[in-house]
Image (tube, rainbow, N blue to C red):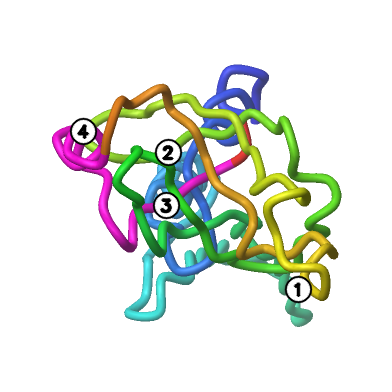
Amino acid sequence: MDIEFLGKLVKAVGVSGYEDEVAELIKSEMVKYADEVEIDKMGNVIGLKKGKGKGKIMLAAHMDEIGFVVNHIDKNGFIFISPVGGINVKTLISRRVIVHGNERYYGIMGSVPPNIKEKEEKELSIEDIFVDIGAKDREEVLKKGIKVGSIITYD
């Protein structure tokens, strides 16, 4: 493994359930070292290196990352999200993210201001978090190929 491969790996999209890009990168690197490499129906990358000894060694690691999925786009073009993995909502405000549509679109996470929420809803929740990609309205977001189900990753 070299630094160029590592750079490609950290830039690849690998949100849980959408690890295809990462799997293909890992496979392309593993073929240099293994006798057999395949990606199974579940998306696992499996490599076999034949040895001369009796023992067997298995190396296992997960290749997914925490991210988000679009669950709603409002009329003003704000993208509301659901988490994929464990998220601390308090760390999301002002985070840079990449929304994956026709291309990669950079955005900033924001939240519904607490002063316009009901008194009993003052606590920040994931439902308050949105991504702003600078779109003027919902139609502009949709034209970029961003829709409900699109993936969002940290920048």
Q: Which residue is mark 3?
A: 151
Label 3 Cα neighbours within 10 Å, binned few <14 / some 14-19 / many ≥20: many
At label 1, the amino acid type is Ile
Instruction: Give the quadrant of residue 6.
Output: top right
Q: Is label 1 in a helix, a strand or a loop?
A: loop
Q: Which residue is mark 2?
A: 99
The alpha-carbon separation of the residues under discs 2 and 3 comes to: 6 Å
N-terminal of the pair, mark 1 or mark 2, is 1
Which residues are drawn in magenta?
138-153
- Closest to the observer, 151 or 140: 140
Residue type pointed to by label 4:
Lys
**Residue placed under numbered mark 4 in the picture:** 144
Viewport quadrant of the C terminus: top right
Task: Point out the tag, 4 or 1, that comes first from the N-terminus.
Answer: 1
Determine the secondary structure under disc 3: strand
Q: What whole-number distance in Å separates the C-alpha atoms at marks 4 and 1?
A: 46 Å
Q: Secondary structure at mark 2?
A: strand
**Residue shown at 39%/27% (left/top)?**
105
Which label lies toward us, 3 or 1?
Answer: 3
In this view, 25 is above or below 35: above
Judged from the image, the secondary structure of the residue bearing numbered disc 4 is: loop
Pointer 1 local density, CA inside 10 Å: few below 14, some 14–19, many at least 20: few
Task: Return the residue at label 1.
Answer: 57
* Residue projecting furthest to the top: 4
- Residue in the picture at 35% in, 38% down: 76
Foreground tag (4 vs 3): 4
Q: Gap between marks 3 and 1, in whole Å? A: 35 Å
The residue nearer to you, when weighing 32 against 96, is: 96
**Dot 3 or dot 1, earlier in sequence:** 1
